[in-house]
Amino acid sequence: MSETIGFIGLGNLGLPLASNLLNAGYALRVYNRTASKAEPLVAQGAQQVNRPVDAVTSGGIVVTILWGDASVESIVTSDDFLEQLGPGGIHLAMSTISPERAKKLAAMHAQHGSVYVEAPIFGGSEAAVAQQLWMPFAGPQIAKERVRPLLKAMGGQGIVDFGEEVGAATLVKLVGNFLIVSAGQSLREALSMAENNGVDPKAVLDMLTTAPTLFPTPIYQRHGKRIVEDTKAAPFRQNKIPLKDVDLFKTTAQQVESSTPIANLLSDLLRSDEARA
Amino acid sequence: MSETIGFIGLGNLGLPLASNLLNAGYALRVYNRTASKAEPLVAQGAQQVNRPVDAVTSGGIVVTILWGDASVESIVTSDDFLEQLGPGGIHLAMSTISPERAKKLAAMHAQHGSVYVEAPIFGGSEAAVAQQLWMPFAGPQIAKERVRPLLKAMGGQGIVDFGEEVGAATLVKLVGNFLIVSAGQSLREALSMAENNGVDPKAVLDMLTTAPTLFPTPIYQRHGKRIVEDTKAAPFRQNKIPLKDVDLFKTTAQQVESSTPIANLLSDLLRSDEARA
């Protein structure tokens, strides 16, 4: 495992993933816009660089975990990122972006002989530490085989292949996030209704998330617990992420004229939570 | 278990529940508006009666599993049902109705010295046969203790006490059904979006309902499977039941000015499925 990996984006999720790679014996060159975020990784032995392109090894693997469409594209088009990555190089893109953008970026890589593989992530920083992440992934087969050990080392418990066409895994991530937001907002509406009628929302949640035939899953349990603590508060602490992802879901649906009545409503609800925050 | 139980309502769910009671050694007097439905129970040893009141033993237990508010009230007010049930009698009401109606019926019983206990049911006929039903229940404590063995014998795996005030258990049932409808309609929107974008909805569903951190529950698995078979079809085969229950959820929320943007949308979506059916 002496291969040096480039790692760009050290946010809430990027940081534990990079740490997992270091623990697994990979050498890392790390970049983050706010440089101080890299400190714990440098203490773990990572080499910090000043520009995204400096994290890239010619013909090597570079990982990005960033906010969204624009930030990923800005990295790819910065300096001579693509030229440096070059033939045999792999960009392992793990951000939640639009499938359309993923396809565009894949085409840009192809022009430089490098390969774009997508593996967006289900799970947060706690799941990363616990090695319980789930990742749909898509891209050219040979590149996927090369990055699979990295995904495992990052904490991937389930790595699910969605074929060679880039965009499919990104779409799965949007579908999953849409369902999570729908579950969270529905729970909030339901538990508020119980509370306003004088029925203890915690007791309701406990039953519904205990019965094996109903909703005994961490999504309902975790969001429900947060809602029960305060049914007036927004169910998502960081509203910007679900709002961005639901809007990406909508855009991706609208391009093929797939109707999105629920996503439209969820987007409105998240936006009004955002405005009140 | 020589006590004779009255059992009114032999629909898809009533029939297997009554059958479970007979198997557990209870004697049953059964009534159903469409009399022929009782045939398999009569073959099992049940006594069929011609009027609801004839199923009632003075001071005994009578079970109802009916369509909704109006049908339960019409049974309770038929002939001298309440007079016959009388002091010490228990009406074990298992239909999905409005909490408001449940409270009204409880008050009517109280006037005749009988007791109304509510225990609506999560689970369908298959879960009844498998003894995997979940039931919130509420009502006076002594009456609940008396009916608990019946609920177990009917197939109750989880019987969850929501206190002495009637209406609470019925509200929990409405909350659960609302969440089920929301999950089903959201899955439909999501899997249609995947399919319309050329991504296999079955593969998407498999991943999302396999990952322990996402939606590994029968609700998502079962509705998802149905949707994957035909993303154009309505996700609920019997749209009348979810539509009725979502509307009851809305009404119950509106009485306390609890806002229901998602329930409003789901009601519209179910209504338009219904219109197209």
Image (tube, coloured by chain):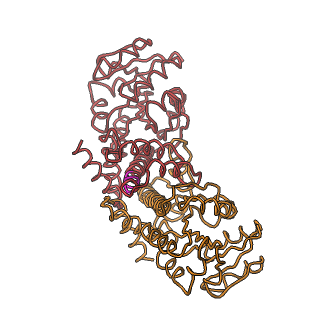
Chain colours: A red, B orange
In x, y percent, where is residue A89? Answer: 43, 27
Residue at left 47%, top 41%? A138
| Frontmost residue, A134 versus B41 | B41
Does residue A177 appear to the left or right of B207 in the view shown? left
The x, y position of residue A222, in whole percent, is 45, 41
**Quarter containing the N terminus of chain A:** top right
Residue B269: where, in percent of width, then height? Answer: 38, 67
Q: Is residue B71 above or below residue A224?
A: below
Q: Residue at x 40, y 77 (%)?
A: B275
Q: Main secondary structure of the magenta part?
A: helix
Query: Which sits in the foreground, B132 or A132?
Result: B132
| Residue B233 appears anywhere in the view | no
Left or right of residue B16, residue A242 in this image: left
For the C terminus of chain A, give its image quadrant: top left
Q: From the viewer's perspective, tell me whether residue A29 is left or right of residue A162.
A: left
Q: Is residue B93 visible?
A: yes
Which quarter of the picture shows residue B265?
Answer: bottom left
Please tell me how many numbered marks the rendered image carries. 0
**With respect to residue A94, does B200 lie above or below?**
below
**Residue B82 painted magenta:** no
Residue B233 picture location, percent across and down: 47, 69
| Magenta-colored span | A188-193
Quarter occupied by residue A118: top left
